[in-house]
Image (spheres, rainbow, N blue to C red):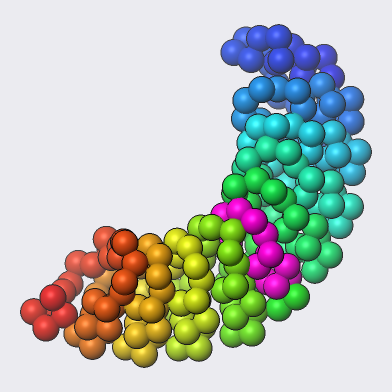
Amino acid sequence: DEERARQFLESPCAADIRLGSRVTTAGALALSPHKGDLHLNGLASLTTNAAMALAGHHGDLHLNGLAAVSDAVAAALGQHQGDWLSLDGVVELSDVAAAALARHRGSWLSLNGVKHLTQTAAASFARQVGGLSLNGLVDLSDEATLALASHRGGFLHLDSFTCISDEAAKALANHDHVLHLNGLTELSPTAASHLAKHKDDLHLDGLTAISAEAAAELARHKGAWLSLNGLIDLSDEAA
């Protein structure tokens, strides 16, 4: 795969970059100088040494074929020098791996396959400096939500939640940047009242209907953008 990687660098449009499901350290080292974005979504596994080599890549890095990353691989990828790191195939992270990936210094970290986060992992991601996408979460305790709400890195995408507790809404309202909750299909007036206190753009595009009480609360939202593009049923009272 080292030869194929070198062919890619010499002629990105013509070279065959089908490396199979794994890449050697030599192949990763050969690819890392590539000036543009690097998509290696066919890789199903990655050694620590190969991850260290790819971490030196200065463009966006997409490794969405990885279903798991060890703590050591996460530590290496957390040092990635590029802007965007995407690991959307990973479904589970240890607290150690979460803390390592949270050290990524780029503008975007995408982990849309992760289904569960402990409070400890959520607290680690709250310290991450860029935008964070966790659109695969299916279960997050109010305590973990409170920890994650203190994320100050930028965009926060939590589009997998179909409902949200009033306490979780209160916590997320304290997030300082753009907040995406596009999976919500229902919203209580109390939760709406909390979210209305959010100070940046708020996206709730999964709501197809909303009560007059919840609409009245959201109308108090002070952010620049309130997105409700999913609404197909709006009563006169809600309008």
Q: Residue 60 location, x and y as percent?
A: 63, 36
x 70%, y 73%: residue = 123
Q: Residue furthest left?
A: 236
First to last magenta residue range? 121-135
Above or below, 51 relative to 67:
above
Above or below, 111 relative to 3:
below
Q: Residue 97 location, x and y as percent?
A: 80, 60
- Tell whether position 132 is magenta: yes
Residue 137 lies in quadrant:
bottom right
Q: Residue 136 location, x and y as percent?
A: 57, 63
Quadrant showing the C terminus: bottom left
Residue 140 can be seen in this image: no
Q: Residue 46 location, x and y as percent?
A: 83, 42
Q: Tell me if 98 is positioned left or right of 64 in this view.
A: right
Q: Tell me if 216 is positioned left or right of 92 in this view.
A: left
Quadrant showing the N terminus: top right
Above or below, 67 relative to 176:
above
x 79%, y 38%: residue = 55
